[in-house]
Amino acid sequence: MPLRLLLGPQRPIVNLDSAVARSGIGDGPIGVISAAWQEAEGDIDDVQRLVLNPLFDLRIYERTEELFAADKRLHEAYRLRQDRLKEQQRLYRMRLRHLMVAARQTLRTEGEPAVVAAERRHAISQLRALDRHHLGQIEKVHARFDSVFTADSHALLSEYTAAIEDELSRFKTVLITGGNVVVLMNRLRLFGLDRLLQRKNIIAWSAGAMVLCDHIVLFHDRMPQGRRDPEIVDEGMGLLPSIVLLPDAKGRLRAKDLVRVKLLSRRFAPASCMTLDNGSLLLFESETLRDSEAAKRITRNGSFKRVRAA
């Protein structure tokens, strides 16, 4: 079964080296996807100093830019898709704001227990309904693009995808770095890497770990311009189903605000919201948790419980 080694941010504490050593992944060469670093893609010298395995960057971001330069029609369609996704996100965020305020107020209110409980369930069900609608709209935008530009129907995209698949065949393990999660997911989707990575061991931290889930949730309670409600920004690769990963939760979540944290957990249930702070480690064998360190699960009551391996 493929291994999924998930880590939190690699600053200030670096645990990539010790995590790889204890994972059982072995000493074979590792392919690297650092597309989330954008123009800094491939700058993996610091990572190579930590990992004994030979590392080879797959140049996913660079290949995308080459492909766009070679096919203006594809590039324009891609940009149009991104514009539609941004507009969809704007409208979703606008609607989400009001439902989140109502849900938080409902969780804070007191009254007849049976009546209040029913209203709390309904408030959360409305949030879930909006999230489902938003994901459905995102799927439609992607489907419109994919109906024209696929590796089966587009010769140049097929050529690039085949070259990536050929390089990937040399590696049993792929490392996915942190960085810009939206840029990363867009590039992975373009080349169908959700399919190509299914049977690979994967090492990933922060954004690299987030894209393995069913969907990608952005969250930040400590932004300079104010708190940001957790929002689904895109589908993930679905390689780790029923989990919502929250990198740098200590820095981004107001853990003492029980209402906000409780709502986060209940809204995405039955998926488990798990923190991935600096120094954290989660090791899955397929979907079975084999090792855990410093990662926590948010309960429906807003508490943080240590994640324990099977």
Image (cartoon, rainbow, N blue to C red):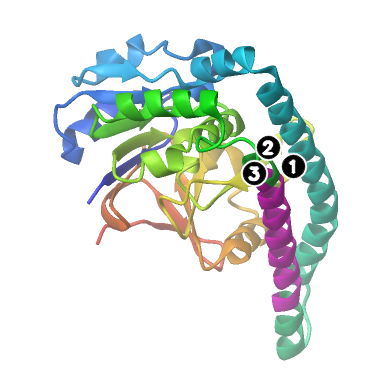
Residue 84, horizontal then vertical, whole percent? 78, 38
Residue 206's disc is none
Q: Are marks 2 and 1 in contact (CB under 8 Å)?
A: yes
Of the numbered discs in the image, which one, if any, rests on residue 222? 2
- Which numbered disc, 1 or 3, marks the residue that appears first in the sequence? 3
Q: Residue at horizontal 54%, vertical 29%?
A: 187
Quadrant hosting residue 14:
top left
Residue type at mark 3 is Ser
Counting other residues with Cα less than 10 Å from the Cα at mark 1, is it few (<14), some (14-19), or many (20 or more)?
some
Q: Secondary structure at mark 3?
A: loop
Kindly state the secondary structure of the residue where label 1 is placed.
strand
| Viewer-closest of 65 and 177 | 65
Percent across and percent down for residue 87 are 82, 40
- Spatial CA distance of label 2 from label 3 is 40 Å
Q: Is residue 8 above or below residue 230?
A: above
Give the residue number, with chain letter if any, for mark 3: 147
Q: Residue at x 53, y 41 (%)?
A: 250
* Cα separation between marks 2 and 1: 6 Å
Q: Mark 1 — residue?
A: 227
Given residues 73 and 31, the one toward you in this image is: 73
| Picture residue at 30% right of the left edge, 17% below the top | 56
- Does 309 appear in magenta? no
Indicate yes or no whether the magenta region holds residue 124: yes
